[in-house]
């Protein structure tokens, strides 16, 4: 039976990766790259697409490599212990805006973003795989998964809520603010990752293959539960990705900047914070909800239906700052569904890993969990790239002035951009949620 300290330690791993680095990358990066760093919309979209193609190769390779790691610290923990500092340093550098021209900025952004994806993969794939070797008890796996989600959403809540106030404390230009906050948040991410590696234990020994082989990669595509769950994972991250990537544009161009209500500054990070705290609460309730409903698949289905209905409802809210609390209330309702299904996804990956071990005779836990991480990055980044591309189509233009080095943003069709932003936050995610419901009907594991 795992101690509470170990569950908290496991939660710290996703507090660092999901609550800090990935949350900022999902929510702040699209707006940061176009409005502060000075990339064009096309460069921003291409950057995220290139990074995802890179991840398609590195994530499964990292999973296979992690499965074959043997050290005094275990199979998966050494990647957290030795990857913590690189994760924090590269993240900090990515939020720094160098004094370069358009070409120099493009090279800097592409190099650092790809490096960040590589380091994130080297830490997060082994982190997810830990769940498969910490316990054999299915109920305890659900508990670890729930702690993970609570940790991610709790830290996401703290990060997003504090962001505008920390910006004001730092002062100076926006590029200076982001650079300082990048260093601060990168340090916290490194500490959380290191603590996770130190506090967790590997109790189960993976059933290793005799030597490296491409067979496990082929086995994946004969594993029907893995195929459907990976598609579901991609869709959940498309759902979140559209909403996170467009939130900054929604506040800036639909509501005409930050909304201040009774002294509370509601910028795009605070706007999404209300969802984070809801996800944290309902992520903790997910195991009880699953038990009450009767299976993970049924619980996931109900959660996806909630997401679809509330996302459609958001589309019909008037595009006016005076309705900000109605918008917040709808975000909260949507986040109930997200909070309920988030722990289930990783617990179901553990089920798929067990299924694969039983069917194939050797463990491919790291490889299977790497697909979860790949789905996370693929869904979030492709949605981010689509947001940038579709905003460009609607009339949003950004870039760096070659003469002054300053970021320039131009809106050629304000009404078109506003309607696109509103739809990307509501109707696009709703369609994805309905697709998740369909895929869950085809998912064959009934646990």
Image (cartoon, rainbow, N blue to C red):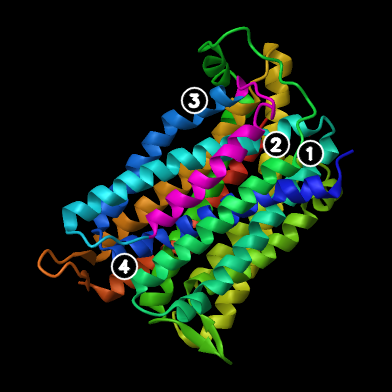
Q: How far apart are marks 1 and 2 (CA)?
A: 10 Å
Q: Can residue 389 be seen in this view?
A: yes
Above or below residue 286? Residue 251 is below
The residue that mark 4 highlights is 36
Dominant SS type (magenta): helix
Is residue 258 found inside the magenta-colored segment of the image? Answer: no
Extreme residue in the top direction = 210
Q: How far apart are marks 4 and 1 (CA)?
A: 42 Å
Disc 2 crowd rating (10 Å Cα; few below 14, some 14-19, many 20+) is many
- Is the C-beta separation of discs 1 and 3 under 8 Å? no
The residue that mark 1 highlights is 141
Q: Distance between the residues labelled 4 and 2?
A: 39 Å
Percent x, y of residue 119 = 47, 40
**Mark carried by residue 348:** 2
**Mark carried by residue 425:** none
Sequence-wise first label, 1 or 3: 3
Q: Distance between the residues labelled 2 and 3?
A: 21 Å
**Mark carried by residue 61:** 3
Q: Which of marks 2 and 3 is in front?
A: 3
Quarter in which the N terminus is drawn: top right
Q: Distance between the residues labelled 1 and 3?
A: 25 Å
Q: Give the range drawn in magenta.
A: 67-95
Quarter in which the C terminus is drawn: top right
Q: Nearer the viewer, mark 4 or mark 1?
A: 4
Q: Name the residue: 58% across, 73% down.
A: 161
Sequence-wise first label, 2 or 3: 3
Q: Nearer the viewer, mark 1 or mark 3?
A: 3
Q: Name the residue: 73% across, 48% down.
A: 9
Sequence-wise first label, 1 or 2: 1
Is residue 77 found inside the magenta-colored segment of the image? Answer: yes
Percent x, y of residue 194 = 63, 46
Above or below residue 239? Residue 425 is below
């Amino acid at each position: 039976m795992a101690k509470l300290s170990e569950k908290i330690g496991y939660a710290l791993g996703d507090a660092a990766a999901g609550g800090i680095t990935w949350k900022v990358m999902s929510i702040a990066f699209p707006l940061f790259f176009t409005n502060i760093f000075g990339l064009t919309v096309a460069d921003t979209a291409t950057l995220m697409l290139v990074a995802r193609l890179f991840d398609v190769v590195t994530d499964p390779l990292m999973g296979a490599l992690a499965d074959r790691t043997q050290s005094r610290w275990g199979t998966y923990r050494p990647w957290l212990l030795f990857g913590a500092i690189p994760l924090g340093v590269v993240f900090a550098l990515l939020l720094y805006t160098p004094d370069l021209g358009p070409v120099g900025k493009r090279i800097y952004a592409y190099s650092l973003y790809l490096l960040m994806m590589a380091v994130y993969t080297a830490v997060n794939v082994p982190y997810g795989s830990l769940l498969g070797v910490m316990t054999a008890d299915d109920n305890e796996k659900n508990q670890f998964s729930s702690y993970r989600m609570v940790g991610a959403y709790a830290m996401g809540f703290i990060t997003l809520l504090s962001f505008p106030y920390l910006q004001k404390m730092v002062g100076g230009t926006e590029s200076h603010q982001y650079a300082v906050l990048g260093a601060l948040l990168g340090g916290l991410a490194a500490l959380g990752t290191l603590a996770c590696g130190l506090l967790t234990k590997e109790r189960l020994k993976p059933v290793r293959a005799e030597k490296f082989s491409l067979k496990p990669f082929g086995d994946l595509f004969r594993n029907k539960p893995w195929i459907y769950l990976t598609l579901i994972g991609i869709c959940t991250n498309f759902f979140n990705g559209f909403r996170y990537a467009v939130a900054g544009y929604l506040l800036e161009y639909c509501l005409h900047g930050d909304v201040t209500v009774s002294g509370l500054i509601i910028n795009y990070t605070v706007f999404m914070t209300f969802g984070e705290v809801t996800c944290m609460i309902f992520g903790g309730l997910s195991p009880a909800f699953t038990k009450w409903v009767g299976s993970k698949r049924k619980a996931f289905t109900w959660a996806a239906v909630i997401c679809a209905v509330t996302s459609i409802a958001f589309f019909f809210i008037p595009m006016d700052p005076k309705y900000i609390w109605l918008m917040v209330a709808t975000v909260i309702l949507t986040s109930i569904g997200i909070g309920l299904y988030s722990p289930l996804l990783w617990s179901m990956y553990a089920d798929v890993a067990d299924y694969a071990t039983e069917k194939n005779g050797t463990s491919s836990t790291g490889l299977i969990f790497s697909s979860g991480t790949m789905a996370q990055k693929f869904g979030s980044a492709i949605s981010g790239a689509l947001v940038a591309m579709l905003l460009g189509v609607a009339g949003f233009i950004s870039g760096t002035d070659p003469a002054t080095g300053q970021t320039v943003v131009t809106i050629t069709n304000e009404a078109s951009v506003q309607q696109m932003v509103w739809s990307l936050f509501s109707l696009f995610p709703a369609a994805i949620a309905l697709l998740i419901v369909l895929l869950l009907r085809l998912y064959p594991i009934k646990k």
